[in-house]
Every structure is written in C-alpha cells, then in structure tokens.
Image: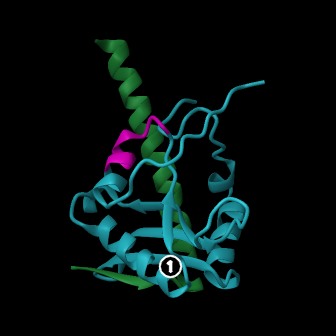
Amino acid sequence: MRHKFGNTYSLEWTFSENAGQKYFRYRIEEDENGIVFVAFSDNVPVGYICGCKFRHKARTKQNMAEIENMFVEGNFRNQGVGKLLIDAFLEKAKKLGAERLKVGAIFENEKAISFYQKNGFKKHEIILEKDI
Amino acid sequence: MVNIKEATIDDLKAISEMNLDLFKFETQIWQYLFIGMDIF
C-alpha cells in the first residue's frame, strides 16, 4: 500500500497495540530523556508530540532532541495546536540540555515539511536509500 | 481553548489511538487520491 509515509514504512508497530504502546510507555514512563505532550480541548485529547533528547557523540557537537512523531486531529488543524505542541517540546528539550532540535519527514510529505519549516526548521540532511 | 499537558501513563491509551488515527488518516487520503485519479 502506498501512502504519505512512503511505501517502505512499516505500519506494524503502530497498528499492533503491543508495539505502539510499548514505545509510548517507554518514552512517557521509563526514558529519562523522553519528551511527550498531549493537547486537550475540553479535556478531550486532540493531538500529541513524542520524542527524546539524545547525543551521538561521533556525529554531532551539540546535544540533540528529536521529534519522532506528532499528530493533530483533523478538526483542530490550522489553529496553532501543532505550534503549541512544538513549543512545549522545545522548552522541555532545553531543560534536558538539548541545544538543537531535529525532525524527520518522508520526502513526499510536503505538508508536514512545510509545517516544520513554518516553525523554524531548515532542511539540513538528506537520507538516500535503495532496494538491494 | 486548547491546553498542552505533559503526558502521563494515564494518557497512553489516548496517544496510541491518535497514533493509529495518524496512519489511518494519511492512508485514507492516498486511497482517495488514487480513486480520484482513476475516475478522471
């Protein structure tokens, strides 16, 4: 199945409750560098952002934080909810010592890339892949 | 009015469900586009 995440993306981890919940549980409860926020409207969750602070000493001079995935429900898009989530993520990342923030998006997902660019991200790295 | 709150384990189910919505939503968009292209 082809979709906005490219045709190589495994949906198993998120469509499998066990794998998806295991990942989120780790980021929320066990990972001291985990960063997870939820957006509520009238006590109803309408969006979330999830990621962590990390450091690859061989690759980066700065402490990094990465937004691994985020989502805003369709009825709440284009109302600044995504920006609120990113701002909260950024503040927590700074408190954890991060100096630079990264996010990845599938090349074809122009809407997501545009959203991140509007929030100050600049294109920095291209990852190339091929089937072998 | 939207409020942002740091997630607790109580939010795990809601986050997981929204994560499912994320993939379902984007997948449906693509299916719709392909159907549209077939028609026109």
Q: Position of residue A108 (x, y in %)?
A: 45, 35
Q: Quadrant of residue A35?
A: bottom right
Chain B: its colour in the image is green
Q: Nearer the viewer, residue A104 or A69?
A: A104
Is A115 drawn above or below residue A101 in the view shown? above
Horizontal relation, residue B2 to residue A55: left or right: left
Q: Position of residue A46 (x, y in %)?
A: 36, 69
Main SS of residues in magenta: helix
Q: Which residue is mark 1?
A: A93
Residue appearing at x 66%, y 70% in the figure: A55
Q: Nearer the viewer, residue B6 or A121?
A: A121
The residue stretch that appears in magenta:
A107-114
Which element is circle 1 on? helix
Residue appearing at x 28%, y 12% in the figure: B40
Q: Chain of mark 1?
A: A
Q: Quadrant of residue A61?
A: bottom right
Type of amino acid at the residue the image marks with label 1: Ala
Residue appearing at x 71%, y 69% in the figure: A22
Q: Position of residue A8 (x, y in %)?
A: 64, 35
Horizontal relation, residue A55 to residue B23: left or right: right
Q: Nearer the viewer, residue A96 or A20?
A: A96
Q: Residue furthest right?
A: A132
Q: Which chain is cyan?
A: A
Is B35 drawn above or below residue A125 in the view shown? above
Q: Confirm whether the magenta stretch covers residue A19.
A: no
**On-image quarter of the C terminus of chain A:** top right
